[in-house]
Amino acid sequence: MMKKKIIVANWKMNYDLHETTSFLRNFLKYINEKKIFHNKEVIIAPSFPFLHISNQISQGTSLKIAAQNIYFKEKGSYTGEISAYMLKSIGINIVIIGHSERRNIFFEDENSLLKKLKIALKHKIKVIFCIGETYEDRNKNNQYSIIEKQLNNTIFNCSTDEIKLIHIAYEPIWAIGTGSTATINQIKKMHKFIRNIFNKKYGNFISNKISILYGGSINHLNAKDIIYSDNVDGGLIGKSSLKIEQFLKIVQS
Ligand code: PEP
């Protein structure tokens, strides 16, 4: 059976209550549910305060709602943080971990990312785990060793059963929000490399099954070529997921 393409919208710190709810209602109104969802999984990640209502709006549809972050403790005195247990209590079963903005702006290191990964998996929350190299890494041709290191320090500490709950998002940092995507050739080569190291570590079954998404300046014009490239199982989309016409085109492409 063909793997479903996975399209993830990361809304970051955008949209208030009204903007969030009207986007979701319009999206569900304009989308041809049967046509789109039989071969695609669409996931939208709004801000924390609107996760609950977003989940209510998407009830009974195939649209899924994800959180953009999680804390690695179960509960307690961690002012401002959100636990796995809280997410589960409002029906959120998917979370993005390791986004480059979390790593760079909020100084999340691989040690804390691994803890976040483990707590999410413990609560059976699916993880979209982001990895990616900087512009300098690529200039020095270090992109493959950097990606391998990022996986070794985090994902590769997971069991075969845990891996089944993980999607990888390869997001070269130099392509995020910059308008310049990686070339199809760069994307294909990196995705093949990632799949091969999963193969070495977990074998054929897991490496074929794991979904590897690309993220970095996907828009309605380049989405189809990227998402249907070899070894690409979908896309993680920032800026272009905020404009409903563009996002509808991406999802329909
Ligand atoms: C992102 O932030 O994960 C992302 C891919 O953003 P953009 O699509 O705007 O490059």
Image (cartoon, rainbow, N blue to C red):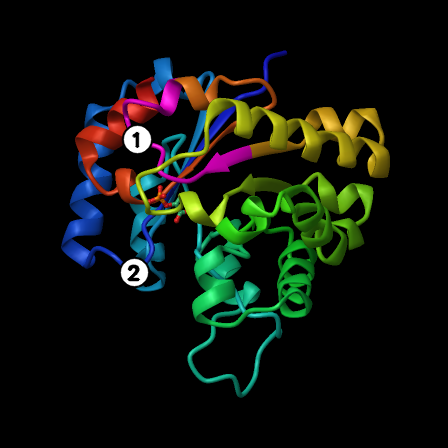
The amino acid pointed to by label 2 is Met
Give the side of residue 102 with respect to residue 156, left or right.
Answer: left
Residue 13's disc number: 2
The residue at 37%/34% (across/down) is 60
Residue 10 placement (x, y as % from top left): 37, 47
Q: Is-magenta flag for residue 51?
A: no
- The first of marks 2 and 1 along the sequence is 2
Residue 50 placement (x, y as % from top left): 30, 58
Q: Pointer 2: residues within 10 angstroms few (<14), some, or many (20+)?
A: few
Range shown magenta: 213-224
Give the side of residue 66 with respect to residue 212, left or right.
Answer: left
Q: Pointer 1: residues within 10 angstroms few (<14), some, or many (20+)?
A: many
The residue at 54%/29% (across/down) is 186
Vertical order, 20 against 74 (above or below): above
Comparing 119 with 179, the one in front is 179
Q: How many marks?
A: 2
Q: Secondary structure at mark 1?
A: loop
Q: Is residue 71 visible?
A: yes
Quarter of the figure that contains the N terminus: top right
Q: Based on the displayed image, in which of its 4 quarters is residue 84 positioned?
A: bottom right
Give the side of residue 221 with respect to residue 68, left or right.
Answer: left
Residue 11 placement (x, y as % from top left): 32, 50
The amino acid pointed to by label 1 is Asn
Residue 141 placement (x, y as % from top left): 63, 43
Residue that mark 1 sits on:
219
